[in-house]
Amino acid sequence: MQIRDFVVFALVGLGYIHTGELLAEEVSSRYSVDTSVAADQELGMQVPLGFRATVFADIAGYGRHITVRDDGVVYYALTVRLGRGSNMGIVAMMDTDKDGVADVIERFATDIPGTALQFHDGHLYYGSKTEVYRFAFEGDEIVPSAVPSIVVGGFPEQRLHEAKTFAIDDDHNIYVNVGAPSNACMEEFRTRGSPGQNPCPHSEVQAGVWRFDADEVDQRQGVHGSQFASGIRNAMAIEWSAVHQRLYFLTHGRDALFALYPEYFTVEESAELPAEEMHILSENGNYGWPFTYYDHYQNKRILAPEYGGDGTKGVESNLYEEPIASFPGHWAPNDMMFYTGEQFPARFRDGAFIVFHGSWNRAPLPQEGYKVVFVPFDGAVPGRDWEVFADGFKGADVLEAPGDAVHRPTGIAQGPDGELYISSTVSGRVWRVEYTGN
């Protein structure tokens, strides 16, 4: 060990500095997954040294996001998907004997397929494909006995990007993601050479984030609330940070650059592009879809080929919002959260965990993503480079098709003691992650 390294780690041990103040490469080596060590296939995930992951529950169904009540009850959303059965609704899970495994498992709202879950003022909010509901609880019941209310409805039915994820801020506003029902707003859906529509008709009620009153019920899109931001293909991962006092989101980037425009893109370029973008969500902000995409290799926003681009033409930087961070293409960011607990080391405080569901369209290259990353923050924006916090979900070193994945991480939530819960889509598994220091 070098003298400098000895001094740094001694100061950490004495409490004079926190691990968050170490150099990025030192922190990364300490709190990133060690890929040289094989993942535990039975557990189905791998975490950094000093952390412990255990199986909290295995649930039958196509799982989505999770949330945790103040008393530690975990709620897990199920939706329906072709070939994945008909289980849907919400699963309530409780560990009454404190052994880290759910021993009480109950289901409700089994007629509502949904994705997003969040508590607000004692109510459980639940985003389906066309509504956002809220459930009231009596006392300490884990399954609500009352019929749910519709907070916002009237969203259009659509086949693609229909999940209504949302975030609620400190002023009781709810921001609902209304995804675009297409890849790039082409005149003919996913047809080689078909031009993009201008204006894009999806932008009227879709392809953006809408703001409503979280405390009101029976609101309808187009009658109540307003479009808060536009040009967003699908903000599956959206979150309010009370510490940073900002809204953040990650959007799913467009697909099929080579399939639709082989004259401009190779199969390798199409597999790697465009970036998955992380943004601060701003009122009246325009984030560029469908006219542009962000190229993380050229570090600039590129004009989409449906609108005259050739893979190199940029756009004026003041027309669209720039990402505060970018990630590899087609990793599919599905959820995010800001860590506010004290159970993990101090460097994790107020940073973001992002869940990447994994790609389906990188062929002939291997599919990628399928991991949880951590992004340290410096104030309200990312500081150092992100690092892989959890991996090993897909169950293979090389994955050729997403259907071969054992697990696909999709949701994340913080427990009352600072522990994390991570959910999987295809397997219905929920893991519990804690810091042990060993």
Image (spheres, grey):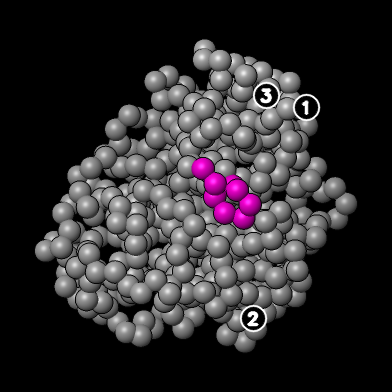
Q: Is residue 185 visible?
A: yes
Q: Which residues are magenta?
A: 377-384
Q: Where is residue 115 shown, x and y percent of the image?
A: 56, 56
Q: Residue 182: where, in percent of width, then height?
A: 35, 70
Q: Amino acid at mark 2?
A: Gly
Report the front residue among 41 and 229.
229
The amino acid on which the numbered mark 3 sits, given as a three-letter code, is: Val
* Callout in the foreground (1, 2): 2
Above or below, comparing residue 177 to residue 28 in the picture: below
Q: Is residue 7 above or below residue 317?
A: above
64 to the left or right of 274:
right
Which element carries disc 2, helix, strand or loop? loop
Residue under numbered circle 1? 97
Q: Amino acid at mark 1?
A: Asp
User: Quarter-wise, where is residue 349 in the image?
Assistant: top right
Give the residue at x 19% y 68%: 310
Circle 3 residue: 12
Give the residue displayed 60% in from the left and 81% down from the top: 226
Q: Which residue is mark 2?
A: 225
Q: Is residue 59 visible?
A: no
Residue drawn 39% across the image and 83% down it: 201
| Residue 414 coordinates in the image, percent (x, y) | 67, 42
Lower position in the chain sequence, tag 3 or tag 1: 3
The quarter of the picture where residue 12 lies is: top right
Q: Nearer the viewer, mark 3 or mark 1?
A: 3
Quarter residue 123 falls in:
bottom right
Calculate the distance from the C-alpha at mark 2 to the C-alpha at mark 3: 49 Å
Above-or-below relation of 132 to 194 = above
First of labels 2, 3 by sequence position = 3
The extreme right residue here reads 139
Density class for disc 3 (Cα within 10 Å; few <14, some 14-19, many ≥20) is some
- Checking the image for residue 81, the label placed there is none
